[in-house]
Image (cartoon, rainbow, N blue to C red):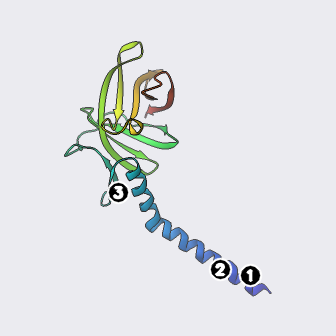
Amino acid sequence: MNRPSTQCLAGLICLSAAGIALYWGWAREFIAIDRCLDQGGGYEELWQTCEKSSQEDPGGAYPGPTYSGVLDGKNVELKLRGDASAYRMVEDGLRVMGDLDTERGFERDPDATVYVLNPYAKAHQQIRLLVSKNAGTDELVQVGADEPDTAKAVLRAR
């Protein structure tokens, strides 16, 4: 009577191990590719990067701080390129590189700076971040194009 339950438990452990191996070996990469394509990017398998940039060489120096927080329900870490023309971000483990545009003026402040991630994408795929200082700490506050007074998320410099 004890033997069938032991065999059943061993079979369940083997099945669980096979499922975990399948996820880490294949499904995780497939999910990353699918997320990248849904966001309008091209997935680079060698570097495991979601490429959203239209520039020939989006590389370069990223001298500024790393901003981190939760954006659209995903943990992100964001760095902006020194010339403010590109960004790189880790979004729930997916590395994303893309174009960046800078806009001046926001609501009543003509000197405010707004970074637009993926400026050449459709409006719902763009991410707009207002540069702000809070108690001496740099922050990027997500704002919408159609609802400018609504802060959706805050990314803080580390």
Q: Residues within 10 Å of mark 1 (few under 14, many from 20)?
A: few
Query: Is residue 104 toward the left or the right of residue 72 in the image?
Result: left
Residue 78 occupies quadrant: top left
Q: Please give the residue where the numbered disc 3 appears in the rendered image.
A: 48
Name the N-terminal-most of marks 3 and 2: 2
* Separation of residues labelled 3 and 2 (CA atoms): 35 Å
Q: What is the x, y in percent for residue 68? A: 45, 38
Closer to the camera, 100 or 61?
100
Q: Residues within 10 Å of mark 2 (few under 14, many from 20)?
A: few
Question: Residue at 42% across / 56% down in the picture?
Answer: 34
Does 18 appear above or below 2? above
Does 101 appear above or below 91? above
* Separation of residues labelled 1 and 3 (CA atoms): 42 Å
Name the N-terminal-most of marks 1 and 3: 1
Secondary structure beneath dot 3 equals loop
Q: Please give the residue where the numbered disc 2 appears in the rendered image.
A: 10
Label 1 sits on what residue type?
Ser
Does 91 appear above or below 119? below
Name the N-terminal-most of marks 2 and 1: 1
Secondary structure beneath dot 2 equals helix
Q: Please give the residue where the numbered disc 1 appears in the rendered image.
A: 5
Secondary structure beneath dot 1 equals helix
* Separation of residues labelled 2 and 1 (CA atoms): 9 Å
Residue 158 occupies quadrant: top left
